[in-house]
Amino acid sequence: MQVLSTLAILPTVALAAVLPAALQSGTKVAKRDSWGGSVSLGPTKSDIINAVTTLIPGTAPATQNGELFLWPGMSNGTGDLIQTTMESWPSNAWCGATTGQWCVRASIFGSFGQLDGTGSAVSGDDHVRIEYNLLSDDNTWVQTVTNAVTGAALSNYSYASGPYMTGYGTGTECDSDCTGTVAAQVYLNTTITLREADTTFGDTIATGAGATYTGLSSSEGGKVWTIATINIPAMGSETAVASSTSAATAHSTPVETAVVEVEESSTVATSVATSYVSASAAFGDDADAAPSASPSGQRSGHGFGGAPKPSQSVGAAPSGAFGQGYGSGPRPSVNTLRHKHQIPWN
């Protein structure tokens, strides 16, 4: 595949005026990434030591054109992005999912790429409890994913990402012209515990693309913050926001025989200013990396600007694998394209 170059960072309206001419000239444009609704808090004047939520994901699309991810994410803006992900791929057989189900796994994105726990299948009406907890060493974060009703373990992962996590937000990430969400998502009893009280943390709450929330409250003098419900609507043309912004992301499909085909021009690619949440202009870098082959065992990173940008490419997985692998599914060996996305709370 050819190197992805940048047309410009343009508002959506301006981009619409430019693209027809490019298309009429026969130029092929890269497949788009986009975002659905979001709710976020941060940055805090303190730092986060625990965060827990219960996600009811809604039914996954029956078929998938690209890659779709739902996640609550946490970052400090310069280090790792902790993000347990609900995933929809062209085939979700790698985690045992059937039509309408998601694959869920604990995950983290950083300069090393993407590290993952094992994956499990979940249905649209499952209550999936996702907890991020900083251990007493003040360095190691443990992600614990369980069925909130039955208590069944779904995934887990531990990694020394360090303290000073300052923002927490939901993500609905649609890559490679994916088939977007067909059902609403609901987050219940999202609770964020800070190291020290921050009475202004609630003032940082922001929403995007039709998402809403209810019941924002605090206790312990501003140390513990709770959102009773977060409602993320199903994606549509009015809610999806095209983006190619500030964090490195590259997905490889977890099906050994699948290849993500991305048509690109050596001279033209779309790089749109994302109006994600309240941002009026993009504040990250443009897409700048060439497609690269994923080594067997690697799932390259996805996420937003809370994760650091690898200097060149995501790099090879240690010992041929990231984290705990893909559950019982095959490890991918496919072409991937690196993109960049931005975060609303850094």
Image (cartoon, rainbow, N blue to C red):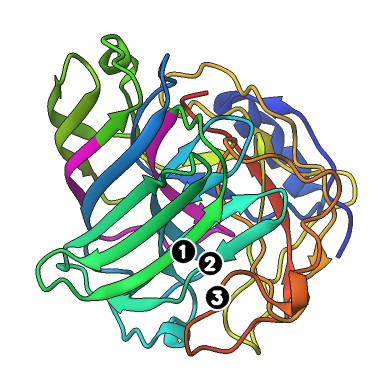
Is residue 276 left or right of 130 when viewed as pictured? right
Q: Is residue 131 above or below residue 254?
A: above
The residue that appears at 51% across and 65% down in the rendered structure is 67
* Residue labelled with disc 1: 157
The residue that appears at 77% across and 56% down in the rendered structure is 314
For the residues bearing labels 3 and 1, Cβ distance under 8 angstroms: yes
Q: How many marks?
A: 3
* Residue labelled with disc 3: 324
Indicate the secondary structure of the residue bearing disc 3: loop
Quadrant in which residue 92 is drawn? bottom left
Q: Which mark is residue 114?
A: none
* Residue labelled with disc 2: 116
Q: Position of residue 188 (x, y in %)?
A: 15, 46
Calculate the distance from the C-alpha at mark 3 to the C-alpha at mark 2: 6 Å
Number of residues whose C-alpha sits closer than 10 Å to that of mark 3, classed few (under 14), some (14–19) or many (20 or more): some
- Could you tell me the amino acid type at mark 3? Gln
Q: Position of residue 283 (x, y in %)?
A: 64, 22
The residue that appears at 45% across and 27% down in the rendered structure is 166
Please identify the quadrant where the N terminus is shown: bottom right
Q: Position of residue 58 (x, y in %)?
A: 21, 62
Q: Is residue 301 above or below residue 319?
A: above
The residue that appears at 49% across and 44% down in the rendered structure is 137
Q: Which residues are magenta?
A: 167-191
- Could you tell me the amino acid type at mark 1? Tyr
Is residue 106 left or right of 188 when viewed as pictured? right
- Could you tell me the amino acid type at mark 2? Asp
Indicate the secondary structure of the residue bearing disc 2: strand
Q: Position of residue 70 (x, y in %)?
A: 38, 55
> Does label 3 or label 1 sit earlier along the sequence?
1
Of the pair 63 and 253, the residue shown nearer to us: 253
> Does label 2 or label 1 sit earlier along the sequence?
2
